Amino acid sequence: MATSSSWFYWAVLSAVFAALTAIFAKIGIQGVDSDLSTLIRTAIIIVVLSLFVVYAGKWSNPFELSGKTWLFLTLSGLATGASWVCYFRALKIGEASKVAPVDKLSLVLVAIFAFAFLGERPSLQEWTGIAMVAGGVLLLAIKR
């Protein structure tokens, strides 16, 4: 199913949908508590993904997964939830065009964490790009 370059197309689609998430959320949270908005969005995600997994024939017994898998998927879910709560609160009080780029500081942090914990070793060119992203985030975050 996946080829060595197919990850790129999925990543681009992820970026497109993440951008739409910010725009749709900014419009949708007007007059609504940001935490309630996050809960509604999460419920919709659960329904849509459940239907997709069943329809695609990808359902398997989750209780057969290893303890390590459960631990790290749980930690990932907790981190995702915390990220979404913070993101929606930031969107509620800030401009989407400023909140979303600062949120993408996660790209820099992923590179650093992957280096520290996963043994990944980005090239000098990749570190340069990561540094440029960090610089761009700082430029966007500085008040004019």
Image (cartoon, rainbow, N blue to C red):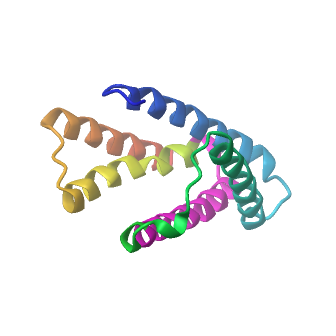
Residue 144 vs residue 130: left or right? right
Q: Quadrant of residue 41?
A: bottom right
Residue stretch rendered in magenta on the structure: 70-97
Magenta stretch contains residue 84 = yes
Residue 80 lies, in percent from the top left, at 53, 61
Of residues 14 and 85, the one nearer the viewer is 14
Of residues 53 and 38, the one nearer the viewer is 53
Q: Is residue 67 above or below residue 27?
A: below
Q: Is residue 102 above or below residue 39?
A: above
Q: Where is the N terminus found, in terms of image quarters? A: top left
Magenta stretch contains residue 85 = yes
How many labels, in total?
0
Task: Inspect this view and state whether residue 23 appears.
Answer: yes
| Most common SS among magenta residues | helix
Of residues 32 and 80, the one nearer the viewer is 80
Q: Is residue 125 above or below residue 109?
A: above
* Picture residue at 30% right of the left edge, 28% below the top: 4
Residue 79 lies, in percent from the top left, at 49, 66
* Picture residue at 62% right of the left edge, 39% below the top: 56
Residue 131 vs residue 54: left or right? left
Q: Quadrant of residue 16?
A: top right
Of residues 119 and 60, the one nearer the viewer is 60
Task: Inspect this view and state whether residue 78 appears.
Answer: no
